[in-house]
Image (cartoon, rainbow, N blue to C red):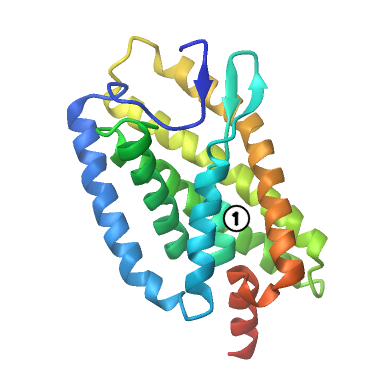
Amino acid sequence: MTSTYVAMHMSDGIVNAPTSLLFGVIAVAAVAFCAARARTELDERTVPLAGLVAAFIFAVQMINFPVLPGVSGHLLGGALAAILVGPYTGALCISIVLVVQALLFADGGVTALGTNIVNMSVFGVAAGYGTAVLLYRLARRRGDVATSGLGVIAFIAALVGTVCAAMGFVLEYAIGGAAATSLGAVAGYMFGTHVLIGVGEGLITAVTVMAVAKSRPDLVYLLRGAREEVAA
């Protein structure tokens, strides 16, 4: 592995061309599916929030925080977007950010765009939101969930989402890794560093979610979905 690493945009050439093409097709299908399902999550109140979430994630991803010597991380944003605007809309937000970064800022390879979208927009969002929903439902059995409790849920969800996104990279490397590094070394490195990166991700996610929940809880998709379940 290289001595300088930034989570978790893949660059060109890390996996071979057939693998890049395969996950490019998967990414297109996933984005199309999310675009169709996002209509159920959006209304006139939440559309502006989705735009703000995408802009916020884009801006914060430009800020790296140190993890280990030669290793730095940045916000992935999957759990954050899903908790605030819903999993399908959240996946679209992350995908848009990744496309802009790859095409305009050369952050992540163009041929690796499909793998990056699958890792961060699909695996990261699905794992993060699934964890948040499970923990929130468990917490609600004991009564109303305080804002601080929501922050803890957001922290854990972001940590899980970050690690799962990293394991998506390991899966792709196992299928068609083009580098000489062994799969075991890649898996160990990715897991270890992304647990630490997930802590930073969790802190940013928790603070942001709590801030929105305090001012406009009606705009937090996770809370809104829970209220709709109770009403039904």
**Picture layout, residue 6 above or below residue 130:** above
Q: Is residue 86 visible?
A: no
Q: Residue at x 60, y 55 (%)?
A: 131
Q: Quadrant of residue 163?
A: top right
Q: Is residue 158 visible?
A: yes
* SS at badge 1: helix
Q: Position of residue 59 (x, y in %)?
A: 54, 45
Furthest-front residue in this view: 104
Q: Position of residue 20 (x, y in %)?
A: 24, 33
Q: Quadrant of residue 88?
A: bottom left
**Picture layout, residue 198 above or below residue 69:** below
**Picture layout, residue 94 above or below residue 1:** below
Q: Quadrant of the C terminus?
A: bottom right
Q: Around disc 1, counting alpha carbons within 10 Å, would you say few (fewer than 14), some (14 to 19), or many (20 or more)?
A: many
Q: Position of residue 200 (x, y in %)?
A: 67, 37
Q: Nearer the viewer, residue 103 or 8?
A: 103
Residue 124 appears left or right of 18:
right
How many numbered circles does the render carry?
1
Q: Position of residue 128 (x, y in %)?
A: 56, 52
Q: Residue at x 52, y 15 (%)?
A: 4
Q: Residue at x 21, y 39 (%)?
A: 22
Q: Nearer the viewer, residue 43 or 23?
A: 43
Q: Amino acid at mark 1?
A: Thr
Q: Residue at x 50, y 70 (%)?
A: 48
Identify the residue position indicated by label 1 in the image. 131
Residue 184 appears left or right of 143:
left
